[in-house]
Amino acid sequence: MTELRAEQRSRAEQHLEGRMSATHARKARLGLPLLCAILLSTAACSVKAPDIAYSFEGIDLGLRAMALREVKELQSQGRRVWCVPFARNASGVQIRGNANTWWGKAAGTYERGRQPVPGAVMAFAATGGMPMGHVAVVSEVVSERELRVDHANWERNKVSLGMSVKDISANNDWSSVRVESNPGSYGKAYPINGFIYPASTQIR
């Protein structure tokens, strides 16, 4: 009698273990996809958004860094920051004098042209509102009618990096531009003399 009960109890335990194993298996089958989904969701949330690409192709980063260091030093001393020293330091184009004289002084020393190239100096002509002209360094050519510049004192006593400039000339020759002085807002038209190319610049 005792042996019969023991055998019945053993069968009951085996049956229970079988049911528990099946339950665990079902839970495992259901839990695995859920676990994978959670892991994928977590991974997706932890992926860092790609940084906005900024092209420095053709730019001498050493000169650019030096120009920015000098600006920071001048600002720390309470001194003015001007477009000419910044453009000279950032581009390597060794011309002195007011910005409106750069185009003429570059003749015979540096190549000049109408094609924007990273590293070139963009020479703004003098106007009634800007009698001394302005110079900026091309940092990126975005398209046939848009580029970006690094320049100083467009906003008083500050440096602006990667500022958008659009060609609005009738002949698509960069003789007239608008500058994105404020995000999404392009100001009035400015006449451009052209681009002064550093000695190391490759003009395609």
Image (cartoon, rainbow, N blue to C red):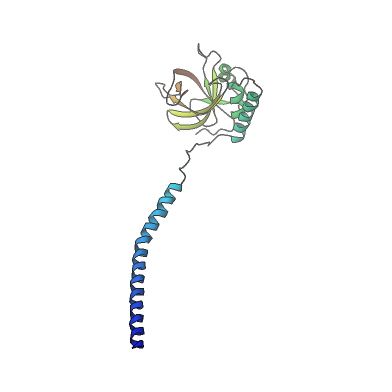
Q: Position of residue 191 (x, y in %)?
A: 47, 18
Which residue corresponds to the image point at 37% horizontal and 57% vertical from the top-left? 34
Which of the two residues, 164 or 127, is positioned nearer the viewer here? 164
Which residue corresponds to the image point at 59% horizontal and 20% vertical from the top-left? 82
Q: Quadrant of residue 168?
A: top left
Q: Is residue 91 left or right of residue 171?
A: right
Q: Is residue 35 left or right of residue 73?
A: left
Which of the two residues, 2 or 183, is positioned nearer the viewer here? 2
Q: Position of residue 71 (x, y in %)?
A: 62, 26
Q: Is residue 63 left or right of residue 114?
A: right
Q: Position of residue 199 (x, y in %)?
A: 59, 30
Which residue corresponds to the image point at 33% horizontal and 66% vertical from the top-left? 26
Which residue corresponds to the image point at 40% horizontal and 54% vertical from the top-left? 38
Query: Where the N terminus falls, by quadrant?
Result: bottom left
32 vs 180: above or below: below
Q: Position of residue 190 (x, y in %)?
A: 47, 18
Please count the marks in the image.
0
18 vs 63: above or below: below
Judged from this view, the residue extending furthest toward the top is: 128
Q: Is residue 154 left or right of residue 62?
A: left
Judged from this view, the residue extending furthest toward the front is: 1
165 vs 188: above or below: below
